Each structure stands twice: as structure tokens, then as C-alpha cells.
Amino acid sequence: MTHTFTPLYERIVSEEMQELREYVRIIESQSHCLVDLEQLQVDLESRIEVELVRSRKLERSLAQHERKWRLMFKNLVDEKEHVEKLAREEKAKVDKLMEMVNRLQTEIHALIKSKVQQHNQHGSGSIHHHHQQQQEQHHQQQQPLHYPRSVLTDRNSRHNHLNGNLNPTATIASASTTNNSGIRLSSSVVQQHHQTQTNNINGIDRSGGGGGGGGYRKDRGNMIGPHEILAYSGSEETIRESNALRLLLDFFGL
């Protein structure tokens, strides 16, 4: 039996075939898309895993850094408190030292002021005393001075010996009378200049005894003048030096 296909049947079959081909094409396209999506999923999953590992690592690092910074912050806070405590203690010490320095400065200033006042008073008194001593020395130099008993006795003995006078009683009496009638030189001066005066007297007696005058200043008795005082006490330069030295000693209170 032979089949005879009508045109309608053929047309329907051809349409269905076209639809099937279209479905196949769509399925194939969807299959390709599915494969691509699966590959993309695999890639994304791998990336997600990598990022997950990285994020976990970053989280661990963050936790470590947080602990580290917390510890550093705590150390800095402790150090800040310690430094502030030291600063307060040092400030208290500085305040005490400044108070002590100010007190010592006040005491030193008062001490120096009192010393200066005492020095000024002592210096004015020493200058006044030295001025009085200079006036007394000038007054003594203006008046005739006499040698001490021992010096005059020795001088008169030499004088009488050179003139042929061998009466010691008259010599002693003359020296005693002259010595009691004037201003006496101090014993310290006699001890210091006894040898110098003896040498000067010997030189004067030798120069005066060889002539016809009969001795040293016979016309005025035993009185001596300014030149004899200088010869007895030393040169004029020596007197000035001793006066200057005494002035310095009086000024410094030594």
C-alpha cells in the first residue's frame, strides 16, 4: 500500500521539522551558555576562595596590629603619666631650689651690706686715727727731741773722751737732765734703731771732735734737729714707705 501525502500533511511536517530544528538550535545555544556559566562559576569560586584566604589573612594581620597598637598605646599612656609625675617632682624640686637660692641671695646681700658698712666704719676710723697719728708725728717733729738715756750716755762718753773729759758723773748727770726735760723716744724705736744711731753718732763725733769746737753741737747742749731725727729714724724715703705701709694696714684692718 502506497502512502500518498497530501500537501497539507507535508506542510505540517515541514513546519514541525523547522520548529524542532529551532528548538535544537536553542538548546545548543543554551548548552553553550550553560558551559560558559559553569566555567564562570568555577572561576568565581576560585576567586572567592582566594579572596577568602586573603581576607582571613588580613583579619589575622588586623588583629595582630590592633593588639600591637593597643600595647603601644598603653605603653605611651604609662610613659606619659610617668613623665608627668617626674615633671611635677622636678618642678617641686626647682621651686624649692629657687626658694633656697632667693633666701641665700638675700642672706648674702645682707651679709655683704653689713661687711661693707663695717669696712666703711673701720676705714673711716682708721683714716681718722691715721690722720691723728700724722698730726702727732708732725707735732713731735716740730718739737726738739732727746735721745734715750743709753744713747746719750754713750754719745756723751765718746764726746767727753774725745775732749779729754774723764768725769763720768758729770756725763750721766747731763744725760739725765736732758733726757727728763724733753719728749722721750719709744723703747721699740730705740731697740730698732739703736745700732744705726750709734753708727751715726760715731761718725758725727769723729767729724766734730777733731776741730776746735770741742764736740757735737756743744752750743745747744744735747738738743737735736730735724736732720739728726732723719739720721736716727732713717732716710726720708724710708719714713714715707713706713707711713704708706701703716696706712695700708690700717685700711685693711690687719
Image (cartoon, rainbow, N blue to C red):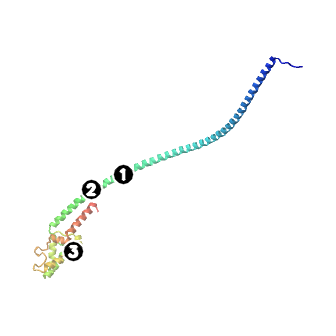
Q: Residues within 10 Å of mark 3 (few under 14, many from 20)?
A: some
The Cα atoms of the two marked residues, 1 and 2, are separated by 22 Å
Tell us which disc is closer to us: 1 or 2.
1
Q: Amino acid at mark 1?
A: Gln
Instruction: Report whether 69 appears left or right of 97.
Output: right
Residues at badges 1 and 2 in contact (C-beta under 8 Å)? no
Looking at the picture, tell me which residue is in the foreground, 249 or 236.
236
Looking at the picture, tell me which residue is in the foreground, 2 or 90.
2
Q: Residue at x 23, y 59 (%)?
A: 127
From the image, tell me which residue sits under label 2. 120
Position of 236 relative to 23 (above/below):
below
From the image, tell me which residue sits under label 3. 196
Checking the image for residue 105, the label placed there is 1
Q: Residues within 10 Å of mark 1 (few under 14, many from 20)?
A: few
Looking at the picture, tell me which residue is in the foreground, 154 or 197.
197
Q: How many marks?
A: 3
